[in-house]
Image (cartoon, helix red, strand yellow):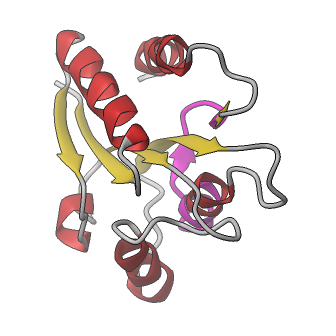
Amino acid sequence: MVKITLLVGTTYGFAQELAEQAACQLRDFGCEVTLCMAATLDDIAIGEPGVIIVCCATIGQGDIPNNLLPLYETLQKAAPAMPYKRYGVIALGDSSYEYFAGGGKQMDALLASLQLQPIQPMLIIDACESDDPEIEVASWIEQLYQKI
C-alpha cells in the first residue's frame, strides 16, 4: 500500500477542498493518505520512503499560506536530503497577479532542493482560466497514481 502525505497550504479553504477531494480519490485507489493542515517534520516521516503531495494556495506577494509556512521554514533550515521520497505539487493562483502560483512554486523548488523526486510536473490551477479545477485535480491525481 502506498503511503501518501498530503500537505495543504490554504487561507480561504479552496486548497483544502481540493486536497480533501484528492485524498478521497487516492483512498479509493487503495492508498493510505494522511491529510495535514498544519504539518510538522513528524508528518513528513523523514527517513522513510513515501510520497508527498502539496496542495498550496498563494497569498500576498506570491507567499505560502500561514498554516504551511512553519513547515516550509523548518524544511529550509533543518531538513536533510530525501532522495528516497517522491512528490507532486498542485499550485493555486490567479494569473492577474505578478507572483502567480508563487506558494506552490516555492514548495516545488524547496522539495526539489531537498532531492525529492518529482512524480510528474506541477499542476497549476489559474483562478482566471480554470473552468473546473476539481476535474483538473482529479485527472492529475489519476495520472500521478498511475506513476506510483
Image quarter hosting the N terminus: top left
- Residue that appears at 54% across and 60% down: 111
Q: Quadrant of the C terminus?
A: top left
Which is more toward the observer, 80 or 38?
38
- Horizontal side, residue 55 vs residue 13: left or right: right
Where 26 falls versus 85 (above or below)?
Answer: above
Give the quarter of the image for residue 9: bottom left
Q: Position of residue 117 (x, y in %)?
A: 54, 46
Seen in the image, is 103 located left or right of residue 15?
right
First to last magenta residue range: 108-124
- Relative to 118, residue 61 above or below: below
Camera-side residue: 89 or 144?
A: 89
Between 147 and 139, the residue placed more toward the observer is 139
Q: Residue at x 44, y 12 (%)?
A: 142
Verify whether residue 119 appears in magenta.
yes
Quadrant of residue 124 within the rendered picture? top right
Residue 101: image location, x then y, percent: 68, 50
Q: Is residue 98 magenta?
A: no
